Amino acid sequence: MIDSDGFRLNVGIILSNEQGKVFWARRVGQDAWQFPQGGIDHEETPEQAMYRELKEETGLNPDDVAVLGCTDDWLRYRLPKRFVRRNQTPMCIGQKQIWFMLRMLSEESSFNLAHCDKPEFDCWRWIDYWEPSKRVIFFKRKVYKRALKELEPLLESV
């Protein structure tokens, strides 16, 4: 769904382990790493979208994770002009996201990146909490920093 301002409604997922490391995945066929994320379908809540995207992109089920919380409001980023598809209607100029902080409860063997017909990721690893804000593609860095900063206290409370 794209709102009236041209932002695609989306969820982002920060999945942590017991050591406070976060799940970091490489997009299929690219040297591009990111957190799981995806669009919110019509009549779907952000939480429903988060669970759907979690299953599609990692193979994890709701009972494999604990939801620690989410951002208080939408976090937005604009796409660089060269990435905007001007021939699409409605035109998408960026994304607005609700970010969720999850804690892994199950074993790593529960991951299945090939769970769906068209996998998003082909490789994953655990990395230090703040690394994604330095490594993600440049136009997502501010949103990653804001999400990590807002959600960090949730890790400390566990």
Image: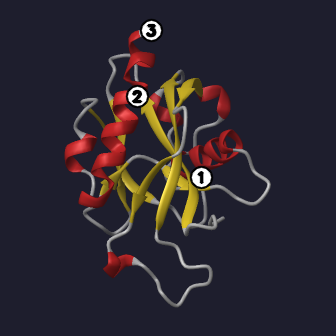
Name above or below for residue 27 compared with residue 130.
below
To which residue does mark 3 refer?
157
Identify which residue is drawn at 52% across, 91% down: 87
Q: Which amino acid does label 1 sit on?
A: Glu
Q: Tell me if residue 125 can be seen.
A: no
To which residue does mark 1 refer?
56
Q: What residue type is labelled 2?
A: Glu
Judging from the image, what secondary structure is the residue with disc 1 in?
helix
Q: Tell me if residue 37 can be seen.
A: yes
Work out whether mark 2 precedes mark 1 in sequence or the reverse, and give the earlier one.
Answer: 1
- In which quadrant of the rendered view does residue 127 lie? top left
Q: Which amino acid does label 3 sit on?
A: Ser
Q: Position of residue 21 (x, y in %)?
A: 32, 26
Q: Which of 92 and 13 is in front in this view?
A: 92
Mark number, residue 150: 2
Q: Where is residue 91 in the image (x, y as percent from the top left)?
A: 55, 79
Q: Residues within 10 Å of mark 1 (few under 14, many from 20)?
A: many
Q: How far apart are labels 3 and 1 at the CA level?
A: 28 Å
Identify which residue is drawn at 34% across, 29% down: 149
Judging from the image, what secondary structure is the residue with disc 3 in?
loop
